[in-house]
Amino acid sequence: MIRCDKCSNDAVIYQRYAGMHLCENHFKADVVRKIKKTIRKYGMVKSGDKIAVALSGGKDSFLLLKILHEIITPRRDVELFVISVDEGIAGYRDELLSEAQRFVERMGLFHKTGTFAEKIGITMDEIVKQNFREAPCSFCGVFRKMITNKIAREMGATKVATGHNLDDEAQSVLMNYLKGDINRLSRLMPKRPIEGLIPRIKPLREIPEREITLFGILEGFPISVRDCPYSRRAFRSDMRKVLNILEDDHPGISYSLMRGFEKVRDVLPDSREDIKECEVCGEPSSGNICKMCEFRSRCRVHQFMS
């Protein structure tokens, strides 16, 4: 058995990008250290914050909630609560959210769930049956963000914390590079707050997905090995495969991609200069009609939305 490079205990991981063998204790400490460093680096948590943690029921959001709970609970000047979104994917999201509810209850935090059925008037299962040319993720991402933002705003949140990890962020950067979409690239880390949009923070953005998975296994998180049944058509799925191959052959490539993005981020144009109110729902939008209302108008929705 290979020993940890920092003590005599058995190693549970070899970080190829760092050249380090780490035991369970040193591995967990390394993950927590990186998360705390990211929070400090970007000033993610301030006195007076009321932070809504987006909990999907996946390993990333479980780790996010656990660490933020440990950091914030001792403080009296920061509040924490949880938001989940049920897209209406039978046999998938409902099972994950059941585990999420039990996880939150053990922490004694307030938990608010919004559903596509109530907020949009249609479920993802029903959207997929309408056979739109766009991948299901296009609709899901827009609707999920809108619901999370509205609940967070109604609850008085100052920030929404999401479980985006290093792989997610690197995939987003690569996707937008390949598409030549500078506007979307600049939105990955907005330079200024937008009225009506609760700022998002990503404390896990420097933690590789594989390490989050290992952390969850060691902690006994209720980890699901199933991917969303509708994710296969997404361009992001292709980017994930490409980056995994590159990471295997060139350890640390995702960190390098993000460092390159950080160097050019400040010179990217501010794509949100002309934000206005959507003429239909009044939510912030870059056009006269927001993407949520555009998508919703194309769906055959029910009439009991809230």
Image (cartoon, rainbow, N blue to C red):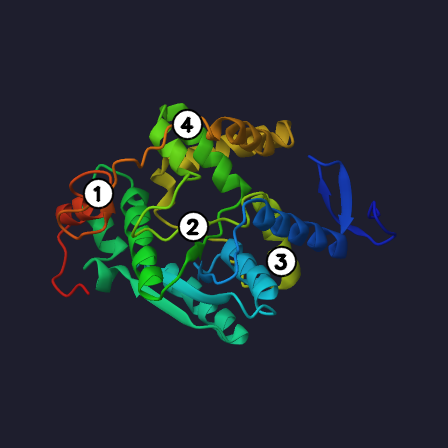
Closer-to-camera residue (68/127):
68
What is the three-letter code of the residue carrying label 1? Answer: Lys
The x, y position of residue 162, in whole percent, is: 46, 53
The residue at which mark 3 appears reads as: 217
Distance between the alpha carbons at the discs numbered 2 and 3: 27 Å
Q: Are marks 3 and 1 in contact (CB under 8 Å)?
A: no
Q: Is residue 44 left or right of residue 121?
A: right
Instruction: Determine crowd level at label 3: few under 14, some 14-19, many 20+ residues with C-alpha closer than 10 A.
Output: few
Q: Is residue 90 visible?
A: no
* In the rendered image, the vertical position of residue 198 relative to residue 106, given as above or below: above
User: Upstream in the sequence, badge 4 or badge 3?
Assistant: 3
What is the three-letter code of the residue carrying label 2? Answer: Arg
User: Upstream in the sequence, badge 2 or badge 1?
Assistant: 2
The residue at which mark 4 appears reads as: 268
Seen at 16% across and 43% down, the residue is 289
Distance between the alpha carbons at the discs numbered 2 and 1: 19 Å
Tell me the quarter of the picture where residue 89 sits: bottom left
User: Upstream in the sequence, badge 1 or badge 4?
Assistant: 4
Distance between the alpha carbons at the discs numbered 3 and 1: 45 Å
Instruction: Determine which of the numbered discs, if any, sits on residue 276 in the image.
Output: 1
Instruction: Determine crowd level at label 4: few under 14, some 14-19, many 20+ residues with C-alpha closer than 10 A.
Output: some
Q: How many marks?
A: 4
The residue at which mark 2 appears reads as: 200
What is the three-letter code of the residue carrying label 3? Answer: Ile
Give the SS element for disc 4.
loop
Give the SS element for disc 3.
helix
What is the three-letter code of the residue carrying label 4? Answer: Leu
User: Upstream in the sequence, badge 3 or badge 1?
Assistant: 3
Distance between the alpha carbons at the discs numbered 2 and 4: 19 Å
